[in-house]
Image (tube, rainbow, N blue to C red):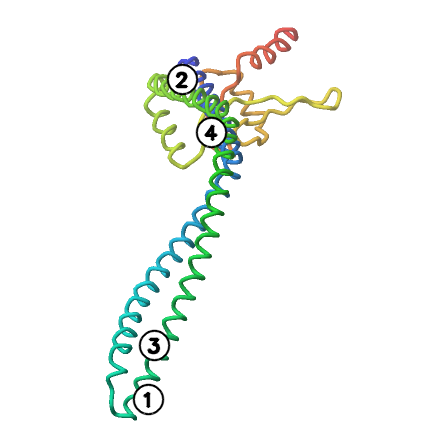
Amino acid sequence: MSLPTSPFIELANTDQGIYLKTAQARQLDQLIEAARAALDEKLGEQTALQQEHDTLAQGSDDLRRKIALQEEFVSKLEAQVPLIRNEKEFVASKKQLEEGRRHKGQLEEQQLELDIQREDIQQKLSDLNSVIAEHRTEFEDQTSQLQQQRDEVEQELNGLRAQQQQFKSQIPDRLQRFYDKFLQRGMSRPICAAHKSESSRKEAKHEWGCTGCNMVLPPQLINEMISLPENPKHCPHCQRLLFIPADALESEEEPQAADA
């Protein structure tokens, strides 16, 4: 499976750039969300107060209609009771009139109480609106630079994605199919560099690892990649395609040349 090294490595480098820029964009989004938390909290309070105010307003309107009906009922009784000549009927009607007046007074008291609550909520809403205006200004000041950075990162990502498609079109179809299938599985960076670790022990052999899954690679696999760098190999752990960066390859070849 021989292929030109440049498009293959350029695609890997572009994927790495997309990976890093995506992480940067996610971090900026989190910072913007954190800055917005205080504003969202006040907006939530505003919504709850407005709903409570609207409920009280609806209750007050319902009471007003009931009071109007009760007032009409009492007015009719006040006009009828003096004309009643039957004593028993007169006593019953007078009692009904008194109950009607009492019920009307109760309804008026309830409406007055609701109106007082509404006025209190209206004052709270007015104060809260001032606080929200301050929070909104603070949020815009805090996030203007963050949003500018976020927009710049998005532009860079769009450029990298265009490069990604360009370099992908230059690798063999078989590798393109592998590349697309790998991404479809929700995994990032189908192509990764093999990385040589720095050993803390003197005269200890360096271990090579996959930068995609961070697992140690078999020495035999590394030897094959050094011998034929134009042939990509699969990581035995995560199945990503591997390549050895040029600087790492040169550092491996220098000791061999010195031994020769």
Instruction: Say which element carries label 3.
Output: helix
- Mark 1–mark 2 CB contact (< 8 Å): no
Q: Which of marks 2 and 3 is nearer the N terminus?
A: 2
Q: Earlier in the sequence, mark 1 or mark 3?
A: 1
Q: Distance between the residues labelled 4 and 1?
A: 98 Å
Which amino acid type corresponds to the residue marked 2 in the rendered image? Ser
Q: Name the residue under label 1.
A: 91
Please name the residue shown 25% across and 77% down the image: 79
Q: Which of marks 4 and 2 is nearer the N terminus?
A: 2
Please name the residue shown 27% across and 82% down the image: 82
Q: Position of residue 114 (x, y in %)?
A: 43, 60
Q: How far apart are marks 2 and 3 (CA)?
A: 100 Å
* Label 3 CA crowd tier, 10 Å (few <14, some 14–19, many 20+): some
Q: Distance between the residues labelled 1 and 2?
A: 113 Å
Please tell me which residue lies in front, 135 or 198.
Answer: 135
User: Closer to the camera: disc 1 or disc 3?
Assistant: 1
Q: Distance between the residues labelled 1 and 3?
A: 14 Å
User: Closer to the camera: disc 1 or disc 2?
Assistant: 1
Q: Name the residue under label 2.
A: 2
Q: Mark 4 points at which residue?
A: 240
Instruction: Say which element carries label 1.
Output: helix
Which amino acid type corresponds to the residue marked 4 in the rendered image? Arg
Q: Name the residue under label 3.
A: 100
User: Closer to the camera: disc 4 or disc 1?
Assistant: 1
The image quadrant of residue 213 is top right
Which amino acid type corresponds to the residue marked 1 in the rendered image? Val
Q: Is residue 255 above or below residue 186?
A: above
Q: In this view, does 26 lie above or below 90?
A: above
